Image (tube, rainbow, N blue to C red):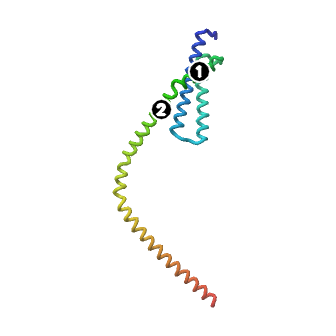
């Protein structure tokens, strides 16, 4: 393919946009990390996933804009796109995403608390009788335990008596 200056400019700007897209995807992963705390294994998997996605995106952009030919200005365009995105848009995107996640979280918590209202009412109604019944069972359990201890003591005494009788025989 014959590369004209117009073609090269098109490829360069495509790579700049590709770099901006890769940086945006990285911000999406950053938002996920800030919203959900995770362990080192999950972070490693996220990083691996990010690099696979970034490789596919950049390969696709180079393939469609330049038929897969890699030139120096392709790297310069990608790096420039990442830098432009980081300087101009990254903070705004992060704040917007975190705000949206915060709003969604508050909505879910509010809905969940409304759904729990009937259960809270039933709990308040049942709480007093349940305590009374629980106290009755606890008293009964203590009586059974006391009776069991007395019977166990009687069995121990009976065992000693039988042991003494066997010795005499």
Quarter placement of the C terminus: bottom right
| Residue 156 % position (x, y) | 56, 80
Q: Could you tell me how far apart the alpha carbons at marks 1 and 2 are, in whole angstroms?
A: 24 Å
> What residue is shown at x 45% (from left), y 71% (from top)?
142
Q: Nearer the viewer, residue 160 or 18?
A: 18
Instruction: Tell whether label 2 touches label 1 (CB within 8 Å).
Output: no
- Please identify the residue farthest to the bottom as the structure is shown: 168
Q: In which quarter of the image is residue 129?
A: bottom left
Give the numbered dot on residue 168. none
For this view, does 141 lie left or right of residue 25? left
> What residue is shown at x 60% (from left), y 12% (from top)?
8
Badge 1 or badge 2: first in the primary sequence: 1
The residue that disc 2 covers is 97
| Residue 114 % position (x, y) | 36, 45
The residue that disc 1 covers is 80
* Number of numbered markers: 2
For this view, does 168 lie left or right of residue 108? right
């Amino acid at each position: 393919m014959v590369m004209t200056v117009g073609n090269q400019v098109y490829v360069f700007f495509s790579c700049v946009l590709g770099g901006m897209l890769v940086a945006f995807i990285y911000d999406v992963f950053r938002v996920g990390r800030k919203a959900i705390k995770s362990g080192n294994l999950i972070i490693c998997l996220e990083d691996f996933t990010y690099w696979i996605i970034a490789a596919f995106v950049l390969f696709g952009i180079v393939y469609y804009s330049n038929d897969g030919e890699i030139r120096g200005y392709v790297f310069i365009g990608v790096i420039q796109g990442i830098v432009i995105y980081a300087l101009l848009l990254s903070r705004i995107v992060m704040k917007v995403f975190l705000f949206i996640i915060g709003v969604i979280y508050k909505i879910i918590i509010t809905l969940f608390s409304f759904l729990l209202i009937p259960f809270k009412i039933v709990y308040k109604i049942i709480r007093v009788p349940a305590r009374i019944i629980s106290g009755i069972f606890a008293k009964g359990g203590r009586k059974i335990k006391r009776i069991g201890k007395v019977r166990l003591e009687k069995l121990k005494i009976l065992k000693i008596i039988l042991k003494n009788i066997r010795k005499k025989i």
